[in-house]
Image: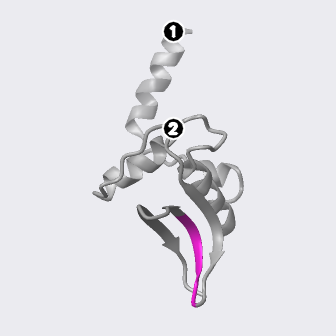
Amino acid sequence: MVSVVEGFSQIAARRPAVFNSLSVLRVGADEVVHSGVLAWLLDGAGGHGQGPMFLNLLAETLHLSISLAPEDRYIVRREFSGPEAVVDVCVCRPHDFVIVNSGAI
């Protein structure tokens, strides 16, 4: 069995990674599902149990000066309608920060 696992690892290392979990779930092109997954990941109170880890990683990647501890509270909303647009995902803490991912109407 060890030989089989080692052989598979060598074969897998030579192939490009093409795994797409959203395609496996058959929601590869569903924008509403994508927004839901993104909102769930960014929500520190989400059922993933990782607290604000994903939001902190996003903020770090975008060079934003946001760093949240597990006890910090903030709001995540999906499909938020404003007067001129619909925001797919909105993450905010009043008087502190707002991050939006929006699509065109």
Mark carried by residue 2: 1
Mark toward the viewer: 2 or 1: 2
- Kind of residue sitting beneath label 2: Glu
Total label count? 2
Quarter occupied by the C terminus: bottom right
Task: Please state the horizontal and vertical placement of residue 26, each as a whole percent of the image.
Answer: 71, 56
In the foreground, 28 or 51: 51
In percent of width and height, residue 98 lies at 45, 66
Which residue is found at the position 67% from the left and 49% from the top? 24
Q: In the picture, residue 46 is in which quadrant?
A: top right
Q: Determine the main secondary structure of the stretch shown in magenta.
A: strand
State which region is magenta.
84-90
Query: Furthest-bottom residue in view?
Result: 84
Query: Which residue is identified by label 2?
Result: 71
**Residue that appears at 49% across and 25% down:** 8
Give the crowd class for mark 2: few <14, some 14-19, many >=20 residues within 10 Å.
few
Horizontal side of residue 93 vs 25, given as left or right: left
Say left or right for 72 vs 26. Answer: left
Quarter of the N terminus within the rendering: top right
